[in-house]
């Protein structure tokens, strides 16, 4: 019976984490470039239960036999939470500082995972981070800046300095002002974006290194759309349905836990008196 407590409790914890993840997705439904998180629920390994018996064997009182009883499931857990890097819809804003990456051709790797491209931004602690949120601005010093306040980088890893917001960006990433090329946007390519780690600010980073340039890969085709932003790829209807399912699963586990509690109460206070 005590094993049942742990099994039900693990189910409640898993559904609670799943609900928190789905709630965060709903909260970011209007965040440009946001990628919805998705969870993988797995079961703990089953335990094989056997009954130990000591049959009456003349001359051998320690002989035992093992009779299989069956398997016991020990509960579930959230194995991992990974973003869904499917491209979101593009929305026109007509603002020069708004940029969006549009997938044209993204090859599949050997595991069947589709690659993705990202804007590169400067990590305040050093290194490079990545984002799909192209809702950029120009700060007081004239640098192109991401929504998180970090500098947008060019192909050489340098901040992009502009005179004003009267500039154009070509589909192949060149930033032009007064008819001259100022810099080329640093666009990185992730062959397996699931290896990226999401930071507390919603940006992504590659642990132990940096992503290669997307321009150097002939199999990758994309375009930069100026005056557009990429919307979040959160599906509101699907997310609400999944949230209701998680609530119902949590309540079902809760009722089983209450039933266990009543059984234990009766075993202690009534059967224990006999």
Image (cartoon, grey):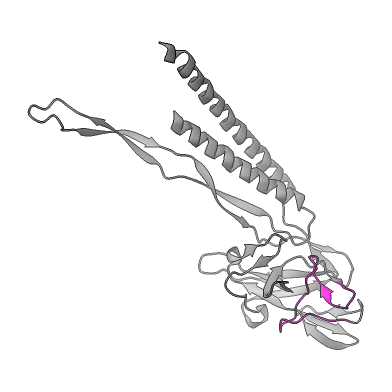
Q: Quadrant of residue 84?
A: bottom right
* Magenta stretch encompasses residue 230: no
Horizontal side of residue 139 vs 148, given as left or right: right
Indicate left or right for 250 with 274 as reference: right
Q: Residue at x 60, y 35 (%)?
A: 249
Question: Quick check: 233 above or below 240?
Answer: below
Query: Which quadrant is the C terminus positioned in?
Result: top left
Q: Is residue 155 magenta?
A: yes
Is 88 drawn above or below residue 71 in the view shown?
below
Total residue callouts: 0
Q: Does residue 156 appear left or right of residue 217 in this picture?
A: right
Span of residues in magenta: 138-162
Q: Residue at x 85, y 84 (%)?
A: 176
Q: Position of residue 260 (x, y in %)?
A: 51, 25
Instruction: Name the main secondary structure of what is drawn in magenta.
Output: loop
- Residue placed most toward the observer, 214 or 65: 65
Find residue 261 and report its horizontal and vertical position in percent.
Answer: 53, 24
Judging depth in this view, the residue of 15 and 86 nearest the camera is 15
Depth check: 188 or 160 in front? 160
Question: Residue 210: where, in percent of width, then height?
Answer: 62, 75
Report whether 107 appears left or right of 49: right
- Residue at 51% x, 42% y is 76
Looking at the image, the residue that sits furthest to the bottom is: 180
Which image quadrant: the N terminus? top left
Q: Is residue 219 above or below residue 98?
A: below
Quadrant in which residue 64 is drawn: top left
């Amino acid at each position: 019976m005590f094993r049942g407590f742990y099994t039900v409790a693990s189910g409640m914890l898993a559904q609670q984490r799943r609900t928190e993840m789905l709630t965060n997705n709903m909260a970011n439904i209007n965040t440009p470039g946001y990628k919805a998180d998705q969870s993988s629920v797995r079961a703990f390994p089953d335990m094989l239960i056997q009954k130990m018996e000591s049959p009456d064997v003349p001359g051998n009182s320690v002989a035992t036999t093992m009779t299989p009883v069956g398997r016991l499931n020990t509960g579930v857990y959230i194995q991992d939470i990974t973003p869904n890097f499917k491209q979101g819809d593009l929305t026109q804003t007509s603002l020069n500082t708004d940029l969006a990456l549009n997938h044209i051709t993204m090859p599949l790797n050997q595991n069947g995972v589709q690659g993705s491209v990202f804007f590169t931004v400067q990590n305040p602690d050093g290194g490079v981070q990545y984002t799909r949120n192209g809702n950029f601005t120009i700060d007081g010093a004239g640098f192109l800046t991401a929504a998180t306040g970090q500098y947008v980088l060019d192909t050489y890893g340098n901040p992009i300095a502009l005179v004003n917001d009267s500039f154009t960006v070509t589909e192949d990433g060149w930033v032009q002002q007064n008819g001259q090329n100022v810099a080329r946007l640093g666009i990185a390519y992730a062959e397996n974006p699931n290896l990226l780690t999401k930071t507390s600010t919603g940006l992504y980073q590659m642990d132990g290194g940096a992503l290669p340039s997307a321009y150097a890969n002939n199999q990758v085709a994309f375009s930069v759309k100026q005056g557009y932003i990429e919307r979040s790829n959160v599906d509101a209807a699907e997310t609400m349905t999944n949230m209701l399912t998680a609530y119902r699963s949590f309540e079902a586990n809760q009722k089983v836990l209450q039933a266990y509690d009543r059984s234990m109460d009766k075993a202690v206070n009534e059967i224990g008196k006999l």
